[in-house]
Image (cartoon, rainbow, N blue to C red):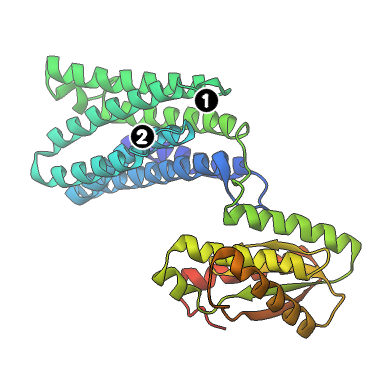
């Protein structure tokens, strides 16, 4: 019976994770904004719930203390990440994720140091605390003003009350009621968790559909989305366009010798120079060290490079930079927006893998 209840909670967490990512919407755009924050935190919470269910199954099957420790930690983190996510949406200080991580690590270690029953009670107390905190946070604006916030708040409030009732039963009658069939048994707790996960996922999707899905202006995600939209407009007018990728090879040196802000200023200057040098151009900085300039194919690539270098040199005095750094160029012909997306993703992947940035 306990295994079936645990499998139900695992299935509910899997459905929750799927629903969250489907709720994000607009898969052709980069994730950013409030909805992406919600998907990130609530998605991690669903993953933690999945792992918790799996660890509990392992604990039941093999009586493993390590599985119990991991299950306790992920259970706490599943609820704590909900609280951290709602705090993020409310624009509050970023202590939620830190507190949740610390609580999970602490409980993981304590499970090896204290009797397993005591560790379970500590976990239950943690669930009461994080559930209550999240329920209260859901009542605060702006999240509290969204449809679905009340369902989320009530769900977590009742979940906190249920776990508090388990602690009260233990205080009054000892551990025996938790070990036999009844409303506070392990089987009942797993079933309650499955219902809570389902209601949380419904309310999260409800809230997510009302949140802004646009990255904030000035972010790389915003630039990627804007480049896609503007390139689509250009391709509607021209059958083919050219993407010129401009880099400052010594950008890392500038970043190290001066500051990251100085390096970003240099990239913005390159983008402004491209706007001066090219006609009907769309510019953006979708990667850490590359400016994209997309324009109709009206001049030779060599002429584009020379015009851009001259425009870049003219702008150096305006940023109080004595030298004129060299620029490197790549030229790619685009026939659809997917070609541009591939280029942008290739630059992001290069940086994630730590490959050299010099072409």
Res. 12 mark: none
Residue 123 vs 301, above or below: the answer is above
> Which one is in front, 26 or 163?
26
Closer to the camera, 195 or 312? 312
Asked whether, in this view, residue 321 is left or right of residue 3, the answer is right
Residue 313 appears at what percent x and percent y?
Answer: 65, 75
Mark 2, secondary structure of its residue: helix
Residue located beneath label 2 in the image: 79
The percent coordinates of residue 332 (x first, y second) are 74, 77
Q: Is residue 66 left or right of residue 223?
A: left
Residue with the mark numbered 1: 142
Q: Determine whether the residue tagged by mark 1 lies in a helix, strand or loop.
A: loop
Q: Is residue 345 visible?
A: no
| Screen quadrant of the N terminus | top left
Quadrant of the rendered image containing residue 265: bottom right
The residue located at (30%, 43%) in the rendering is: 98
- Residue 228 location, x and y as percent? 73, 58
Q: Is disc 1 surrounded by few (<14), some (14 to 19) or many (20+) residues within 10 Å? A: some
What residue is at 19 percent from the left and 16 percent from the top?
168
Mark closer to the chain start, 1 or 2: 2
């Amino acid at each position: 019976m306990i295994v079936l209840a645990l499998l139900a909670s695992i299935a509910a967490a899997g459905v929750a994770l799927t629903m969250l990512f489907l709720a994000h919407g607009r898969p052709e755009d980069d994730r950013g904004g409030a909805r992406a924050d919600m998907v990130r935190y609530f998605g991690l919470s669903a993953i933690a719930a999945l792992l918790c269910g799996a660890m509990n199954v392992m604990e039941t099957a093999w009586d493993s203390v390590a599985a119990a420790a991991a299950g306790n930690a992920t259970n706490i983190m599943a609820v704590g990440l909900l609280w951290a996510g709602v705090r993020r949406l409310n624009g509050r200080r970023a202590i939620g994720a830190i507190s949740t991580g610390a609580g999970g690590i602490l409980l993981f270690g304590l499970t090896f140091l204290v009797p397993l029953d005591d560790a379970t009670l500590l976990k239950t107390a943690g669930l009461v605390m994080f559930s209550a905190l999240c329920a209260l946070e859901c009542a605060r604006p702006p999240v509290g003003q969204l449809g679905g916030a009340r369902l989320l708040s009530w769900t977590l409030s009742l979940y906190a009350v249920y776990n508090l009732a388990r602690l009260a039963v233990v205080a009054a009658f000892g551990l025996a009621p938790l070990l036999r069939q009844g409303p506070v048994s392990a089987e009942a707790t797993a079933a309650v968790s499955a219902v809570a996960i389902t209601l949380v996922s419904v309310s999260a999707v409800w809230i997510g559909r009302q949140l802004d899905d646009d990255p904030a202006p000035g972010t790389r995600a915003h630039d990627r989305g804007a480049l896609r939209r503007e390139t689509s407009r250009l391709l509607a007018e021209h059958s083919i366009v050219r993407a010129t990728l401009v880099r400052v090879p010594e950008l890392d040196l500038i970043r190290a010798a001066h500051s990251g802000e100085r390096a970003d200023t240099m990239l913005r200057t390159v983008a402004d120079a491209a706007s001066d040098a090219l006609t009907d151009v769309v510019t953006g900085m979708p990667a850490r060290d590359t400016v994209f300039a997309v324009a109709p194919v009206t001049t030779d690539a060599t002429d584009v490079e020379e015009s851009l270098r001259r425009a870049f040199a003219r702008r150096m005095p305006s940023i109080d930079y004595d030298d004129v750094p060299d620029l490197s160029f790549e030229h790619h012909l685009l026939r659809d927006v997917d070609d541009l997306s591939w280029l942008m993703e290739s630059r992001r992947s290069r940086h994630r893998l730590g490959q050299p940035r010099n072409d």
